[in-house]
Amino acid sequence: MAQTLDTIRELVRLHKGSRIFYRAANGRRKVEERNGIIQETYPSLFTVYIESQQSTVSFSYADLLTREVEVQLESSGENLF
């Protein structure tokens, strides 16, 4: 199934409150890997609460579409994107 922003947005909304592991490209040869909880979803972005740092990061749905960010459910190990 081809991923569109609408399907990605809906999948993230359905997993709001779920524990995830994410891997995000942060520029040249830098990759950030963290565990967090999908906290909120908005029309253009979603937020993830990082317990270890007690902070929140945000990602756009386009980041998932372009694979700048990879998200995996902690409970099942299933790759969402």
Image (spheres, rainbow, N blue to C red):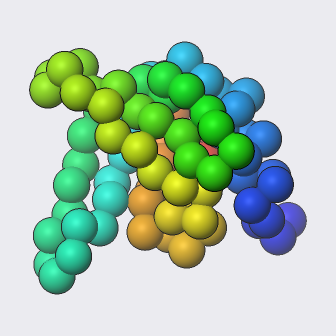
Q: Is residue 76 left or right of residue 12?
A: left
In the picture as drawn, the residue positioned furthest to the front comes out as 43
Q: Is residue 57 left or right of residue 68?
A: left
In the picture as drawn, the residue positioned furthest to the right comes out as 1
Q: Which residue is at 31% across, 31% downward?
A: 56
Q: Quadrant of the N terminus?
A: bottom right
Residue 36 seen anywhere in this rendered image of the structure: no
Q: Which residue is at 61% across, 33% downward?
A: 41
Q: Which residue is at 78% across, 41% downward?
A: 10
Q: Report x, y in % for residue 54.
A: 19, 20
Q: Is residue 28 left or right of residue 24?
A: left
Residue 5 seen anywhere in this rendered image of the structure: yes
76 w.r.t. 79: above or below: above
Q: Report x, y in % for residue 24.
A: 32, 59
Depth order, front residue of 34/79: 34
34 w.r.t. 19: above or below: below
Q: Within the image, what quadrant is residue 51 found in? A: top left
Q: Disc count in the image? A: 0
Q: Report x, y in % for residue 74.
A: 44, 29
Q: Which residue is at 64% across, 38% downward?
A: 42
Q: Report x, y in % for residue 61.
A: 60, 56
Q: Quadrant of the C terminus?
A: bottom right
16 w.r.t. 66: above or below: above
In the picture as drawn, the residue positioned furthest to the bottom comes out as 28
